[in-house]
């Protein structure tokens, strides 16, 4: 039982360290053939948006809105994937519900 407690404590310490390290990491999502790029940090805050002027058409704002939604969703998925990969390094592949 004591061995199990030590493993849990180490896992908690490693998770806290990982969370701190991930605060500095970002992911990038590009959609529309490279016309729109979003950079998002691991806390899912958008840090930057780059829009190619060729997709800014006042007559078709819905297309630009769709590109933004697609880029944000893709970046969010990439953050989730990054978190899952990093978490599996700590948990040894154990699936811990509710962690990420």
Image: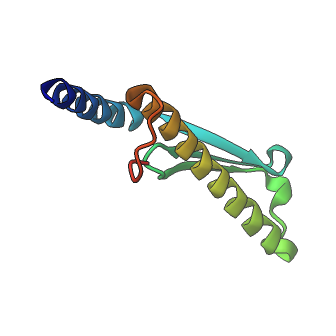
Between residue 36 and residue 53, name the one nearer to us.
Answer: 36
Residue at the (63%, 40%) spot, across then down: 28
Between residue 72 and residue 50, name the one nearer to us.
Answer: 72
Query: Is 29 situated above or below 54?
Result: above
Between residue 40 and residue 8, name the one nearer to us.
Answer: 8
Count of marks overlaid on the render: 0
Position of residue 3 in the picture relative to residue 57 (left or right): left
Which colour assignment does the render follow?
rainbow
Position of residue 66 in the picture relative to residue 59 (left or right): left
On-image quarter of the N terminus: top left
Q: Residue furthest front?
A: 1
* Res 68 quadrant in image: bottom right
Image coords of residue 67 (percent x, y):
75, 60
* Res 27 quadrant in image: top right
Position of residue 52 in the picture relative to residue 99 (left or right): right
Image coords of residue 53 (percent x, y):
80, 54
Residue at the (34%, 37%) spot, across then down: 19
Query: Is 59 situated above or below 31?
Result: below
Image coords of residue 48 (percent x, y):
57, 48
Position of residue 71 in the picture relative to residue 11 (left or right): right
Residue at the (17%, 31%) spot, across then down: 5
Query: Is 54 situated above or below 1?
Result: below
Residue at the (72%, 58%) spot, across then down: 70
Image coords of residue 7 (percent x, y):
24, 26
């Amino acid at each position: 039982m004591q061995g199990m407690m030590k493993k849990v404590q180490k896992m908690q310490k490693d998770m806290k360290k990982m969370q701190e390290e991930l605060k500095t990491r970002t992911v990038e999502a590009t959609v529309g053939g490279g016309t729109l790029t979003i950079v998002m940090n691991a806390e899912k805050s958008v840090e930057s948006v780059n829009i190619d002027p060729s997709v800014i058409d006042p007559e078709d704002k819905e297309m630009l809105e769709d590109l933004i939604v697609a880029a944000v969703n893709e970046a969010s998925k990439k953050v989730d994937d990054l978190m899952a990969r990093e978490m599996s390094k700590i948990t040894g592949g154990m699936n811990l519900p509710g962690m990420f």
